[in-house]
Image (spheres, grey):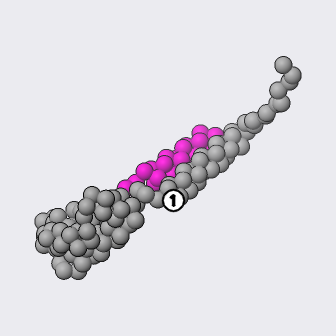
């Protein structure tokens, strides 16, 4: 395989890796359709888990709301409003995972370093580190 083909393959693999890191989850469905009782129950469960979070419950109680008031307000929401707030609550819960974010960052950096080493090996280049001499 020629040098140009090797470099093309390496660049292609690198771009596929970067694109896979940047992809967003997407879902499809009917827009404007009425939510079923099952979907409403799922959204209520999502909101309840969000409200059971210690930080959220402390903030709401600090603002003077009781659990009964909050439950009453949740029950008054229509299906679309409940789905909207449940999706926002899910995105906030996902964003609050610092361990997963840090692990992903470390793995990405490790793969970039390995890719650079692979490119250097395929091109026949070497990195030589010399110790500093006295000042």
Q: Is residue 132 above or below residue 109?
A: above
Numbered disc total = 1
Q: Is residue 2 above or below residue 51?
A: above
**From this viewpoint, is residue 108 visible?**
yes
Q: Which residues are magenta?
A: 1-24
Judge whether residue 16 is colored magenta. yes
Q: Which residue is mark 1?
A: 100
Task: Residue lying at the far bottom in this picture: please name it.
Answer: 38
Residue at 51% in and 59% down? 100
Residue at 50% in and 56% down? 98
- Judge the density around disc 1: few (<14), some (14-19), many (≥20) Cα neighbours within 10 Å: few
Magenta span: helix, strand or loop, mainly? helix
Q: Is residue 130 above or below residue 38?
A: above
Location of the C terminus (image quadrant):
top right
Judge whether residue 90 is colored magenta. no
Residue 54 position within the rendered picture, expressed as x and y whole percent measured from the top left: 40, 65
Quadrant in the rendering for residue 48: bottom left
Residue 39 position within the rendered picture, expressed as x and y whole percent measured from the top left: 23, 76
């Amino acid at each position: 395989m020629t040098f140009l083909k090797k470099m093309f393959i390496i660049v292609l693999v690198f771009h596929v890796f970067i694109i896979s890191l940047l992809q967003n989850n997407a879902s499809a469905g009917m827009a404007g359709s009425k939510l079923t009782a099952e979907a409403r129950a799922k959204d209520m469960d999502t909101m309840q888990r969000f409200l059971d979070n210690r930080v959220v419950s402390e903030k709401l109680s600090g603002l003077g709301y009781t659990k009964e008031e909050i439950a009453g307000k949740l029950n008054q929401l229509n299906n679309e409003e409940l789905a909207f707030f449940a999706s926002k609550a899910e995105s906030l819960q996902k964003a609050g995972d610092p361990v997963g974010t840090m692990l992903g960052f470390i793995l990405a950096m490790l793969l970039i370093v390995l890719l650079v080493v692979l490119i250097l090996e395929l091109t026949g280049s070497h990195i030589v580190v010399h110790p500093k001499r006295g000042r």
